[in-house]
Image (cartoon, grey):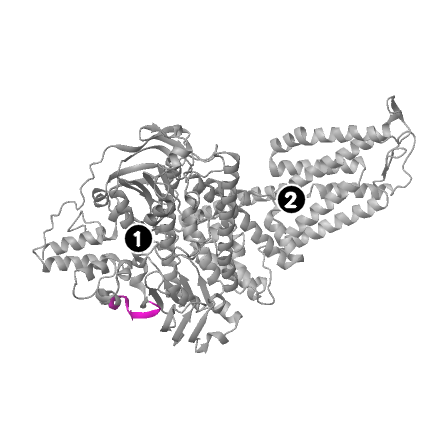
Amino acid sequence: MKKTERKAETFEASDTFSRCHPMLNFFYFAVVLIFTMFSQHPLILAVSYAGAVSYGILLNGAGKTLRQSCFFTLPALLIVALLNPMFNHYGVTMLYYIESSGNWVTLEALIYGVVLGTVMFVVIQWFSCYNQVMTSDKFVYLFGRIIPALSLVLSMALRFVPEFLHQLKVIRNGQKGMGRDVSEGNLFRRIRYGLNILSILITWALENAIETSDSMKSRGYGLPERTAFSIYRFTNRDKILGTVMAFLSMIFTVGIAKGAAYASYNPRILLAGFTIQGRTSPVSAGSLLTAATYLCYGLFCFLPVILELTEQIHLKNSRKHAGADIGMTYRRIYEELEQEG
Amino acid sequence: MNIVEICDFCFAYPDSSKRVLDHTKLKIKEGTLNIICGRSGCGKSTLLRHLKSALAPYGKTQGEILYKGKSLAETDHRTQSQEIGFVMQDPDNQIVTDKVWHELAFGLESLGYDSETIRLRVAEMASYFGIHQWFYKNVSELSGGQKQLLNLAAVMAMHPSLLILDEPTSQLDPIAASDFLETVKKINRDIGTTVILTEHRLQEILPYADQVYVMADGRIQMQGTPGEVGAGLHDADKGMFLSMPVPVQIFSAVEGTGECPLTVSQGRKWLGEYVKDHPQIPTDIKKTKAASGLTEPAIQAKDLWFRYEKDSQDVVRDLSLQINKGEFYALVGGNGTGKSTTLSLLSRVNQPYRGRIRLYGRDLRSYKDKELYFGCLGVLPQNPQSIFLKKTVLEDLYSVIGGKKERMSLEYQSQMKKEKAIEGMVSLTKLEGLLERHPYDLSGGEQQRLALAKVLLLRPKILLMDEPTKGMDGEYKEELGKILKKLQSHGMTIFMISHDIEFVAEYADRVGLFFEGNIVTENDVNSFFAGNNFYTTAANRMARQYFPYAITGKDVVACLQNGN
């Protein structure tokens, strides 16, 4: 009972962006993930990382997010960063000669390894947010838009699996009560008891499925022109937010296409906006467009956090106002009463 | 206007000459609440299923069913889906999707409504049925009562004009059942939906019915208002009689005169007058059952504590319990108070994290599985289907004792021939004639008896049962009760948890009331129910003014007949 209460609570306590339309959620994560995965410019990655971590802290709490980064993703980053120079030997800046294989460890390969590791790190960070925001019903809804029949199948599967597990437990306990538990006796006996349990489970599930199909038929399943209902509504706020998101992503897409985030690590490190070893990137987007690109990308990455913070401020203000308004009204009423009296 | 007319309808399953429905005639008026009753297997479920073509069983039919004056066969699938709602027995199996809101919308999606209409209907249903608090939940988180209410709401969302319910409360606990039936009454009263209902628990709903039909052998045997049917029960068959509300049973048994009482309060009034008219009835009757006097313990549990997960709440808290040898002990109490968990502790399916259970003086943990489950403890699970393994009843029985081969095995350590043992068990549990059937084709009561037979073949000395009377009608209950009494007379110790206080009052020796992981009070069955004001049987509530220790209908009848 307590578990269900907690679940209901988390639904209520989800952040502002999660409460927006699933299509916006999906669009947001698709854009952020694509740009993180295919851009290798350290600034873009840094901005993306900051956005992902702050959103992660908002969703999962600071402790869990940082713990996950330090103990799980950071070691993985280091492994990738170190593995790359071991196997790739391009680049012009030699650092160390490995005698056994006769290869050079190069600065370019080392840096590229770090960049690749960071990409992975940031993507994982975004995915941990994705998992919190894109719940099963949003997923079912989105795919239902594409293939209506699939959404019902997914929904039924999501119903079936917990049911199946529950029945398995009931059956196992029943067999245990008859001295036929899979943890008892020799191997042969255990296998037989296990198969018995499986056989009972399947018979039972099939028998129950007949009733489920009766229930579907009796509620008109199979009639032509079936529609797919969802509880999600595309509100006005969703429209505004969608426009803003489209606008922002358009600007930084153009900027990046023009070379605002040009990055190359082979054979030399060339980064847009930086002069490394006396060389600059071959393409550049102009300072205004570059600035706009980074600003828009930053805004986009921090969008959920910005939304949440503004909503919190609004909520606080509205509460204050509500108190003030009522106070004023009562005072006025009392004053009026006094005058009359 | 008649919404349904069944004209001389006959039905037989293929390859069977026996007609399940035999020239059934029935007319249902629009807007009425109708109850069809009859013993298990009388054909009432088959009849209900024929009222909806999508659910009608396959077989030979004859005669016609009219829906709103038009033949049902000619009424298309869309109209039938929309206008005829059908709620079945099992709350779980009818649910199709994973979310409550999606389940509510399922029928409307099938009918092709647009999102706006569905949103309105779903909102309307959720508000009317009080579902809005758990609207976003996964269906797996709901209780049985909530699931069944959801099934009802999902059907009502299509705005049917005829609602058919096939034993909808048989899997629910009494409180959930009476809530559900209350909702059905409300739908009939407020919205005017015609309701056809079959039910074991007639006590709750019978007084509110417009028409009651009694079915026997595929025919409508009797019909009329509840009062008429109650009064005409003298000559009805016995199975039917046992399903009737207790006041009706008492009234019929003493051949009372005047109007037949249907509810407890009517019964109380009638009883008052009856006692006044018969002043020779002695009212100072003592207990009808003496305390058993058994004191030698079979199971002793001391200070048990149990929880399912490390950080969850304790389900069993400081429970101490003693069950004596040869005694029939029943544990009653509300849903989710930890009764089933207690049973799992006693049967060692789960182990308490504190406290100790002794079985015949020995620590339960020191038993080997072999010793414990083969020849000592028998556990009958709540759902008999969870232990059915083979294709026929006979094979299933043999599977328990290690197959047909005559050899000693782990499961079977008796000198008796297996055939003989099974024969004896079949006659004890009255499974004769069913041996070649598939276990799933048996009725609920028969399935329970088969499960019992399987458990008993392992020769337990103590029988633990989890709600053995769930979903059974009065007749099956009486049969089960008799079997249990017979076992008890041969020295079996029986422990049962149950919601069915009528059954407990009739057969148990000692009763404990379970609340919040603990036994609040326990006493011999007479004192227990006589001492409770709320948690007591209908018969006791009706008669306690005159006969405080009369707890079953039979007790009251015996008291009344004392004076004659």
Q: For this view, does B276 lie left or right of residue A1?
A: left
Given residues B411 and B307, the one toward you in this image is B411
Residue matched to label 1: B477
- Camera-side residue of B211 and B328: B328
User: Mark 1 Cα within 10 Å, few/some/many (few <14, many 20+)?
Assistant: some
Q: Which segment did they paint magenta?
A: B217-228
**In which quadrant of the rendered view does residue B152 lie?**
bottom left
- Judging from the image, mark 2 belongs to the subunit labelled A
Is B221 inside the magenta-drawn segment?
yes
Q: Indicate the quadrant containing the N terminus of chain B: top left, top right, bottom left or bottom right.
A: bottom left
Indicate the secondary structure of the residue bearing disc 1: helix
Left or right: where A315 falls relative to B378: right
Q: Quadrant of residue B301?
A: top left
A293 vs A163, left or right, is right
Q: Is residue A341 above or below residue B187?
A: above
* The label number, if any, that marks residue A307 in the structure image: 2
